[in-house]
Amino acid sequence: MNGYQGNSGKGQGQLAQRFPEVDPSELTRLIIQALSDLGYQRSSDELRDESGLELDSPAINGFIECVRSGDFTNAELKIADLHLINDSDETKRHIVFLIKRQKFLELLYLENSTQEALILLRQEVHELTDTANIRALTSLLMNKDSPELQRSNGWMGDAMLSRDSLLNDISKFIDPNDMIPKQRLFQLLQQSIKYQQSKTLYQFGDEGDRISLYEDVKSNKKNFPDTVHYTLTMHEDEVWYVTFSHDGRYFASASADNHVLLYDAINGFSLLHDLSGHDKQVMHCSFSPDDSMLLTCSFESKAHLWNVQTGELVRTLSLGGDSRIWCSDWFPDGGSFVLGSPDKEIAIFDASSGEVVHRWEGPVVNDLKISRDYKLIAVTYDMNVEVWDLRTKHKVKTLELGQRLTSVSVSDKNPAQILINVSPNELQLWDWSRHILLAKYVGHKQEKFVLRSCFGYDERVILSGSEDGRIFMWNKEYGALLGVFDAHTGNSNCVCWNPRIKSMFASSGDDTIVKIWGPSRTSDSG
Amino acid sequence: MGLYYQQQLKRTKGNSVYMCENCHAHIFQSCQIVSDSFTGITGQGLLVSRAVNLDEGSIEKRRLRTGTYLVKDVRCVQCHEYLGWKYISSSEEAEKYKEQMLVMEASQLHLSI
């Protein structure tokens, strides 16, 4: 298919033997392109001369020349000479549309002639495309200065940028042998790095660590948190829940000894407050978004709201009657919070007054979380994931998973991604909005108990406790096991990641102990 | 022992749920009550045909008012409070109907309506 055979360089035969997948003239053309991308135009031209190879086919060069110089009439004529991947009338019509759209944009922005642009739209563009594209261009006519509309319609601020962007759009329809996609060599190298990273799962280096093209990406366990930095032993019974505050300053642990302990996570995890007031086991706690309040849920069917600064009990909440309260979370704006009950109730409370502002009867709630885009995500005893929109209070999704779902976490980066502990012995990562199971994580043991898991290390890893007392860490994307740590005797009930310190997490166990984990370096830990 | 993944019983009109007094784990539905005139160790006992969220102890021989039985003590699976016993077998033909049933201590239970 390569019709512009050039002069073979010396030694190409040997190279072709060693790298049969790499076509020497393809590579040479990529180098010509890369040299030009790098700004070495003279060397690029020199190599073009020496090899006799062209970056793009003559037909394409003519076409590009027309588009670059704004000769759209001739550009349209030259479409017939292009080798298209899909040589259908529809594709050609779409390319004509893209060119005419550029003409329309230039009339609108360079010649300031709304009238002519409108005529072009009515007489020529109209018949080439669907109503959605026409509507988009019409709204641009009315909102000429909207940057979003400009971008979505292909106007990049000036003629040359827009023409290049047009060429880039059109290049997707053209045989790549005729027109090499933009910055192709760089794309290939980036893919190669990504691939190496996926094969070398331990990417626990510092943010600024250099990746060199001279060598393969190596595994880096510099910040791999496999070492206990602090052991907190002040609870007298099993510890069922641990969490860091959003700003990473505080750390809370909730225990079957009825106490919640609040620690200074910045200064060596010294105890700040012993929050005592619950009469029964405490199973859940959550910091308000501004970290001024801590909400705790206990077996006595009450939730307590504490002042984090002073350690004082601000308010006691209940759902009325005997309704148990097993989980809670805050609205992202901190103005309200939600309590969830296995007695088929979910209630929204106003955070300042403590009054119930909305309540609905629902399924038996095992656990719930609120995403940063105001979705309430609950896992239920009916083995479903239920999602409500907190603005409309309407249910927007039900996923029937058909297995026991003990706890749920929601991603901060992509609020549609949820991580669920599925009993027996599985974690599942779902995109609830697209109804897709993204990954499963296995190896840990969870048969009888409620265990909790979390995202960690910039959401690149998944962490969970296990009924054998160990902690399991997986690569989130590939599901590969990265580490198994002996942590507790009895269950490792709960794990949580420090939202501010990338390589720190905490675990809690039946052995009444809380452990804070970090990298194995001792000199500059913490 | 951890936070147990508890079974949840359906509460309907006319069918209430008895929970562990201490931790509110569901134990049985009122429709499972066979008799409310039994005597437990702590006072009134309820004979029930089926219950959930229980840990069973080891089998022991016990002499009760109506004869000798093999029984297992049962505790709440979550908080391990003593809740009553389960009949495994009876030496008396007339008492065989109790086998696999449980006597639950009313004082250890909380009725949720």
Image: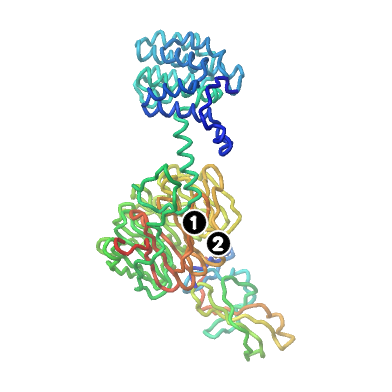
| Residue located 43% across and 48% down the image | A371
Percent across and percent down for residue A199 are 51, 49
Kind of residue indicated by mark 2: Gly
Q: Which amino acid type corresponds to the residue marked 1 in the rendered image?
A: Trp
Q: Residue B104 at x, y = what percent?
A: 57, 78
For the question of whether residue A526 can be seen, the reply is no
In contact (CB < 8 Å): disc 2 and disc 1:
yes
Numbered label attached to residue A514: none
Quick check: A380 left or right of A331?
right
Mark 2: give few (<14), some (14-19) or many (20+) Cα within 10 Å.
some
Q: Nearer the viewer, residue A112 or A515?
A: A515
In this figure, which colouring scheme has been used for the structure? rainbow
Residue A284 spot, x, y in % from top left: 42, 62
Q: Which residue is mark 1?
A: A474
Q: Secondary structure at mark 2?
A: loop
Whether labels 2 and 1 share one chain: yes
The quadrant of the image that shows the N terminus of chain A is top right
User: How many discs mark residues in the rendered view?
Assistant: 2
Q: Is residue A170 above or below residue A17?
A: above
Residue under mark 1: which chain is it in? A
Instruction: Inspect this view and state whether residue A465 appears.
Output: yes
- Which residue bears the numbered disc 2? A443
Nearer to the camera, B6 or A314: B6
Residue A513's place in the image compared with A415, above or below, is: below
